[in-house]
Image (tube, rainbow, N blue to C red):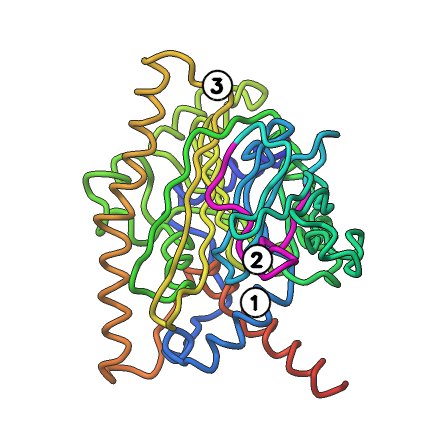
C-alpha cells in the first residue's frame, strides 16, 4: 500500500476507535443459504469463475529459478508451471500429447526437460516435444504439433495469474481494478517463499473466504489467539471492482497518537487484507505475506485450499526458521481449530431448514461486497450466453 494511503487508513482506524464504530454498508444484506448448498450454482461457479476466467495462484517466488516447476490441480484442470531458461514462466496442460498421461507430479528444481512416465515422450521447458522413443513409428505425427498445450499466464507485480483455457486473455490491471498501485507498493517480487500447506474441509469454498471478510468475530471465536492482537469490529473497507480491501487495527495502534504522522509505521500496527476475486485472500502483516487460495471441492459442501507464507529474507538460520514456523503455526491453529470447524458446523446447519438466508450486518460490508460480486459475475455470464 502506498504511503499516503497507509496514513489515510490509519486515520480512519483511530477515528473508529474514538467513536466505537467500524466501516459500514448502507443496509443489511440477506444472503440465500442456497448460495452455499445449491449444486447447480456450484457448477456455474466452477465454470464461470474458475475455468472461464483468470485466477491468481500466488507469488512468482514460488518458482524463483530457471528449471523450477510445480503442478497445480486445485481448479480441476491439470496444470504444469515451469520457470524457463530465459527466466519467464510458462504454463501448460499437464497432459502428454501421446496418450494423455500426466507428465509430472508435485514440484521440483533444476529440470531441463519433462518425460512422460508412460512411454517416455519428452518435452522441453518451453513445452516443445523434443524426443519420443521409436520416433519412426510416429513419422506422420508432426512433432511441432504435439508439444504440450500452453495456457495463458501473466506474471506482474510479483504475482502469477493463469487462465484455464487457451483463449483467455489476462490483464492483471483490469483484474485488480484499481489495486495495482496498492499491491505494487509491497514489492512482492523481492519476497521468498517459505512454506505452503494444503487443506481440505467440509464447507463451501465461499464460506472459507467469508471468515476473512470481517473482524466482528475476533473476540468471540479467537479469545486466546487473534483477539489479544487485534481490535474486534474495528476495520476499514474499500471496494475495487469485484476485489476489496480491509485494514484491521492491532491493539498497539494507539501508539501512533503520540507520534507525528511522518513517523507512523502503519504496517506495524495493522493488517492489510485483500480478497482478489474470485478466490484469493492476500494478507500483509507487518513484514510478511500470507496468501490463501480457495477452490471448490468435488461437492458443493467441500473445499480444497492452500495457504502460503512469503517472507522478506530467506530463512537461513535456526532462529529465523523458528520465528516463521511460530508465525505459520499460530495462523494454522487459528483457522484449523477455530474458524474452519465453526464453518463446517454452519455448512451442516444450512441443510437443517433453520433459515432460508443468513444476515450480513451493516458492519460486514466486505461480506456483502464479495457475495454480491459472485452473484453479479454469474448473472453477467448468463446474459452473455443468452446473447450469443
- Relative placement, left or right, of 37 versus 239 is left
| SS for callout 1 | helix
Q: Residue 378: horizontal and vertical position, in percent?
A: 59, 75
As drawn, the residue found furthest toward the bottom would be 386
- Relative placement, left or right, of 106 versus 336 is right
Q: Residue 380, relative to residue 19: is it above or below?
A: below
Per the rendered image, the range of residues in magenta is 90-108
- Give the residue at x 69% y 56%: 149
- Relative placement, left or right, of 149 versus 102 is right
Disc 1: CA contacts within 10 A as few (<14), some (14-19) or many (>=20): some
| In the image, residue 70 lies in the stretch drawn in magenta | no
| SS for callout 2 | loop
Q: CA distance from mark 2 to mark 1?
A: 8 Å
- Give the residue at x 47% y 60%: 365
| In the image, residue 102 lies in the stretch drawn in magenta | yes
Q: CA distance from mark 2 to mark 3?
A: 29 Å
Query: What residue did someone put label 3 on?
Result: 314
Nearest the eye: 154 or 333: 154
| SS for callout 3 | loop
Amino acid at each position: 500500500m502506498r504511503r499516503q494511503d497507509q496514513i489515510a487508513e490509519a486515520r480512519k482506524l483511530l477515528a473508529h476507535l474514538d467513536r466505537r464504530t467500524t466501516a459500514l454498508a448502507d443496509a443489511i444484506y440477506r444472503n440465500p443459504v442456497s448460495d452455499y448448498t445449491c449444486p447447480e450454482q456450484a457448477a456455474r461457479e466452477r465454470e464461470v469463475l474458475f475455468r472461464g476466467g483468470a485466477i491468481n495462484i500466488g507469488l512468482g517466488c514460488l518458482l524463483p529459478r530457471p528449471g523450477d516447476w510445480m503442478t497445480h490441480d486445485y481448479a480441476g484442470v491439470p496444470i504444469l508451471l515451469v520457470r524457463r531458461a530465459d527466466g519467464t514462466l510458462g504454463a501448460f496442460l499437464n497432459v502428454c500429447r501421446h496418450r494423455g498421461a500426466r507428465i509430472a507430479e508435485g514440484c521440483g528444481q533444476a529440470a531441463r526437460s519433462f518425460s512422460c512416465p508412460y512411454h517416455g515422450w519428452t518435452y522441453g521447458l518451453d513445452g516443445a516435444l523434443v524426443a519420443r522413443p521409436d520416433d519412426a513409428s510416429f513419422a506422420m505425427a508432426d512433432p511441432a504439433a504435439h508439444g504440450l498445450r500452453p495456457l495463458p499466464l501473466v506474471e506482474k507485480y510479483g504475482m502469477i495469474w493463469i487462465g484455464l483455457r487457451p483463449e483467455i486473455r489476462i490483464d492483471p490491471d483490469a483484474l485488480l481494478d484499481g489495486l495495482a498501485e496498492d499491491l505494487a507498493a509491497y514489492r512482492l517480487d523481492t519476497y521468498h517463499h517459505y512454506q505452503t500447506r494444503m487443506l481440505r474441509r467440509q464447507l463451501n469454498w465461499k464460506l472459507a473466504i467469508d471468515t476473512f471478510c470481517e473482524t466482528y468475530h475476533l473476540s468471540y471465536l479467537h479469545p486466546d489467539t487473534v483477539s489479544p492482537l487485534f481490535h474486534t469490529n474495528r476495520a476499514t473497507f474499500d471496494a475495487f471492482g469485484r476485489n476489496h480491501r480491509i485494514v484491521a487495527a492491532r491493539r498497539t495502534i494507539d501508539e501512533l497518537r503520540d507520534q507525528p504522522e511522518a513517523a507512523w509505521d502503519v504496517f506495524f500496527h495493522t493488517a492489510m487484507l485483500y480478497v482478489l476475486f474470485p478466490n484469493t485472500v492476500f494478507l500483509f502483516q507487518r513484514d510478511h505475506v500470507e496468501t490463501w487460495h480457495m477452490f471448490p471441492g468435488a461437492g458443493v459442501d467441500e473445499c480444497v485450499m492452500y495457504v502460503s507464507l512469503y517472507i522478506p529474507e530467506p530463512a537461513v538460520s535456526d532462529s529465523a526458521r523458528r520465528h516463521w514456523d511460530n508465525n505459520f503455526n499460530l495462523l494454522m491453529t487459528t483457522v484449523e481449530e477455530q474458524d474452519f470447524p465453526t464453518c463446517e458446523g454452519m455448512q451442516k446447519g444450512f441443510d437443517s431448514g433453520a433459515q432460508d438466508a443468513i444476515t450480513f450486518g451493516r458492519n460486514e460490508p466486505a461480506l456483502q461486497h464479495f457475495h454480491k460480486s459472485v452473484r453479479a459475475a454469474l448473472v453477467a455470464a448468463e446474459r452473455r450466453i443468452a446473447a450469443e
